Amino acid sequence: MVKLATEVLVIGGGATGAGVAWDASLRGLDVILVDRLDLAEGTSGRFHGLLHSGGRYVVKDAPAARECIAENRILRRVAADCIEDTGGMFVTTPWDDPEYADRFAAACRQTDVDCEEIPVAVALREEPRLNPGISRAFRVPDANMDIWKTVWAMAHGAEQRGARILPYHQVTAIRREGDTVTGALVNDVRGGEELEIEARVTVNATGAWAGQIATMAGIEGVRVFPGRGIMIAMNHRLVNTVINRCQLPTDGDILVPIRTVSVIGTTDQHTEDPDDHTVARSEVDQMLDDGEKLVPGFRQARALRVWTGVRPLFEDAKASDTDTRDVTRAHALLDHRERDSVGGFVTITGGKVTTFRLMAQETVDAVCDMLGSAAACNTATQPLPGSEDGANYRLGERLARKEERLREEQIICECELVSRERLTGVLEQSGSTDLDDIRRRLRLGMGPCQGGFCIYRAVGIMHGAGGLDAPAAGASLSAFLEERWKGVWPILYGDQLRQVRLDEWIFHGVLDVDHLPGGPLAAPAEGGPLAAGSEGGPLAAPAEGDPLAAGPEGDPLAAGQTPSAGFEADS
Amino acid sequence: MRRRRYDVVVIGAGTAGLVAGVRLAELGAEVCVVAKGVGSTHLAPGTIDVLGYAPQRVDSPSAALAALAAERPDHPYALIGVDTVSAAADWFIATAARGALPGYNYVGSLDRNLLLPTAVGALKPSALVPETFAAGDSRLLGRVAVVGTPRLRDFHPSLCAENLRAAGIDASAISIEIETDRADTSTLGLAHRFDDPAWRAAFSARLAPLIKGADHVALPAMLGLADPHGVLGELESRLGRRVFEIPTLPPSVPGMRLFEILRQALLAAGGRLALGAGVVSHARDGERIVSVEAATAGSPTRYEAGAFVLASGGFHSGAITLDSHWAAHEQVLGLELRGVPGVDEERFVPGYFDEQPLARAGVAVDSELRATGTPNVFVAGASLPGSASWREGSGEGIALASGYRAAGRVAAELGERVAA
């Protein structure tokens, strides 16, 4: 068993956990972060991408609104590259209580949420697809945030300061000596090793899973209600501004433009299991109907993908157990010295992505208190790696960068403009050959074709680079197809069904991936699928190096000597 | 509005529509194929896969078809009949042999599938294949060098070769550097280069020293569009080895050759082809369709005909759609569908590799491929219900045989009416 020691062990690699690692390492603490899966693969990677202005909470939960607008202003500075400043609107649709708009405007003033009423005509000119039946419109500083970029920037920044970030490391036990938590036993899911991590303070930043980790530490009563919500990505920027319905928060009342898509959300279903990703047909229908109210014709647009996320809602004694939206959205920091007389252990849960930095700050304040450190928090002023110039992300950045080198760079994924260099760079940097890991880093396979063209290319390039052998490549391909299908089949209609059929054409009609050796439908192998398989070894490899690097004199294939007659490739 | 009158109008220019058009023209009908654009040919690998899996790998389609027809009486092959499938295959081989690309013949038969390497290195069963594929039949393969270039993102020889080795084939991967004017190259771009004698001579000269131990050379399917037979022969002679093509991601070069063969055969037989002519509406007289209107350049065109062949494809082409309430519609002529799961049933299931309940949906037909409720419309190709073509490896075979069969039925009816 490998033994590691650190000052702070962070369990959970979502926005909060990564935020804790970043904050703590900025304060000079030694940090190890573990997550059972990839970073931001839980709740953080499964939200709609909205950086709240706070407008959503002004009437119902003024403290939450104040927190949101304060964090919104901070994150725009320190995580500039992860945020696209779309702006937002609250609009009163024919289905909303017209009285609410005035209460909303007044509550914005009281909570310091910037809000300006604009004429409906202006709102419709800016967002022509918006329901022309809206009666009021307010401009607020909503934005979208790329959470993967944010989390990796924090993890990367923490690593630069010595932190060890260990995705795919699952906690199997919490170490306890008497009344003190002293770290955890961890299973390296990919490497198969057991690790013992000794830590002076252990931070439970596992969100909806916080109760499970607390129980492992022998602490009872940390109850987190997983509130499951579905989100659907539509394959267009149906709007370019975040659109909220001006009403008390309910289902399907937010439409967030992010990257090349727009995301409608969300529902709210209590579930017992935070790993429950059921998508009910009725919820999909509800989202589409709600989308139709915001943007008429919504059902004719192309739905790309549906997913679910679970909100970590810390139990409130007053909460009814059927509607989790009434359980507090505020975050909860539990110092288990006070609560349970257990030292060296804090739990941070609840809250929302917009306030993750504040949650991390409060958590690391508590950690410093335990360690007797007086270091102050810097995360409100220290930009994340990549955000130093303070420039926000702009839609079109990727395209602009690609256009500069269009003839030099091979594009592997046209939908998301991923180049071959980016892919091989990430392979080297992350060491992962899991297509789903790659997808989260590069957005490979996340566009309209959902991997139809790029996945064969990516697997082929990874194989050629020696990153994975053929059985692993085949398994990776199958796993990717199955994983994508989960998010596609519940919303499969219209043009996306047409796309899936084209993808089937490629994967089955052209490549026949089902019948690869070891593939899902391959015949049981008895000396290979050939009736009489030959045994011989591989061919004599070609002469070392790249014998074509220097072509013969006058070789018309050499650069600058392509024959003038005939066609240009791709002309 | 322009008006045109034909004996028969075929809707759709994929394999099924073109085959129906050629066959009808050969049988003496005035026929026009109208289509929104080119069809399945440009996506598919250019082979005619008649029956590859049932569900185990099929060695002999002719033997397996009878069993399939018996087991699934509503399968297109059951309606068409095994003898007609066989006749269609013979007809197709003969049509290709006297077609637009001299020497570029289709080989194979329904008696035994060839097992051809795919771009990922699986072995796919195909009945009729272009001669440029034939040397890839894995049962005959010796030591094969799988050749690709980093310039071509759509073909990865190392992965292909390793999977072939896992299947018992002595394969190795060769990567060859070529210079192009930009980093992204497709098989289509390279096919245009292979049409140039100087370029392919230089390519062969570069490749020859790298393949010493091999007796077969596999290349991505890109050996020219103008004269693939000549290119193949030249490469084999320059390299001194058997050469074959492996199809890869669309656009499909061998598929475009197939389109060209069928297009030229249609014109040679006196038929017409109108591309860029998507059908937008139709007119009925009682049960019969009397005309369709197509959105052609400048102004619409009305195509009147005594009979129609609907070969507009399935969900992939947009001719059949599923709306956001999960109701299915035939978009071209508003025909009745079959095989669509009921309102309360699932259209899809969570396992990607499981058969999807919607997979066998298509336009409802009788045993003569006549659309239910519309006696002068015959249905062919992926519009037909009853097959799960990608699981079966049967799509192009159904397209060929049903196009052939529908043409025969229509011609017989026209003859009867003329006789009457």
Image (cartoon, rainbow, N blue to C red):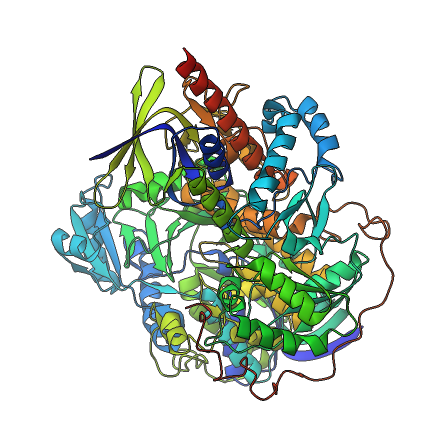
* Residue A341 against residue B55 in the figure, above or below: below
In the displayed image of the protein, which residue is found farthest to the top?
Answer: B420
Residue B84 visible, this angle: yes
Query: For this rendering, which residue is in front, A280 or A356?
Result: A280
Q: Where residue A355 appears, x then y in whole percent? A: 41, 65
Q: Is residue B395 left or right of residue A62?
A: right
Quadrant placement of the C terminus of chain B: top left
Q: Where residue A372 appears, x then y in whole percent? A: 56, 82
Q: Is residue B91 left or right of residue A287?
A: right
Residue at point 32%, 14% (across, down): B286
Q: Quadrant of residue A214?
A: bottom right
Residue A436 visible, this angle: no
Residue at point 79%, 54% (across, down): B140
Quadrant placement of the N terminus of chain B: top left
Q: Quadrant of residue A64?
A: bottom left
* Residue B150 against residue A510 in the figure, above or below: below
Q: Where residue B264 appears, x then y in whole percent? A: 46, 46
* Residue A113 against residue A379 in the figure, above or below: above
Query: For this rendering, which residue is in front, B341 or A420?
Result: A420
Q: How many marks?
A: 0
Residue at point 48%, 70% (across, down): B184
Query: For this rendering, which residue is in front, A99 or A137?
Result: A137
Q: Where residue A186 appears, x then y in whole percent? A: 72, 67
